[in-house]
């Protein structure tokens, strides 16, 4: 079973990398999900770009759906996290993506693939803050344990 999850992770990474490379090659745009979503929400100024953005987002959702239709077991949710904490996390992630001029997919996948120093710094900041946040939420506040 362990080898199956390793294969799935490798396949998923290859698909993400291929999609990011194809998007950059075909459109000249970076596959930064937060930027794509933001521009879909405010795409009225550039309607010619709305189609590929919607198609890209639909591909993400349909890819996950196909994965589960293929027999994959869904991972467990985060029922033990309070809703206010999940909402706060979402707001902070959105703020961080805006502050960093991109998200983990834009900087971590695409930027590092292009050897961008700015993306390396942003990714190191993202990862450092994620490790710190996880440590504080789990060990200081006591949230996040499987039996919390």
Image (tube, rainbow, N blue to C red):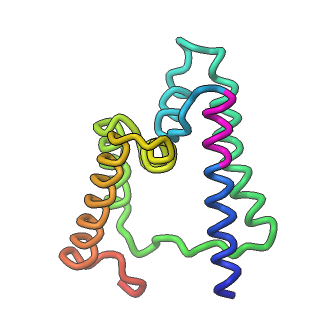
Q: Is residue 21 magenta?
A: yes
Region in magenta = 18-26
Image quadrant where one finds the N terminus = bottom right
Q: Position of residue 23 (x, y in %)?
A: 65, 35
Asked whether, in this view, residue 104 is left or right of residue 8, the answer is: left
Dividing the picture into quadrants, the one containing residue 97 is top left
Dividing the picture into quadrants, the one containing residue 131 is bottom left
**From what the image shows, is residue 46 above or below residue 102?**
above
Asked whether, in this view, residue 91 is left or right of residue 49, the answer is: left
Q: Position of residue 79 (x, y in %)?
A: 46, 72
Image quadrant where one finds the C terminus = bottom left
Q: Is residue 61 magenta?
A: no
**Residue drawn at 44 percent across, 50 percent down:** 108
Please state which of residues 123 and 84 is positioned toward the viewer in this rendering. Answer: 123
* Magenta-colored segment: predominant secondary structure: helix
Please state which of residues 129 and 87 is positioned toward the viewer in this rendering. Answer: 129
Q: Position of residue 88 (x, y in %)?
A: 31, 53
**Residue drawn at 61 percent across, 33 percent down:** 24
């Amino acid at each position: 079973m362990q080898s199956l999850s390793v294969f799935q992770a490798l396949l998923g990474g290859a698909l993400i990398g291929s999609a990011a490379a194809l998007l950059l090659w075909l459109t000249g745009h970076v596959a930064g999900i937060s930027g794509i979503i933001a521009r879909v929400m405010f795409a009225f100024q550039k309607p010619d770009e709305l189609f590929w953005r919607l198609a890209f987002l639909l591909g993400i959702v349909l890819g996950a759906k196909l994965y589960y239709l293929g027999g994959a077991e869904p991972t467990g949710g985060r029922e033990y996290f309070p809703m206010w904490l999940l909402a706060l996390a979402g707001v902070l992630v959105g703020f961080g993506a805006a502050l960093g001029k991109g998200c983990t997919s834009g900087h971590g996948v695409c930027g590092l693939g292009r050897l961008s120093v700015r993306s390396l710094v942003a990714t190191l900041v993202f990862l450092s803050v994620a490790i710190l946040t996880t440590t504080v939420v789990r060990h200081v506040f006591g949230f996040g344990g499987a039996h919390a």
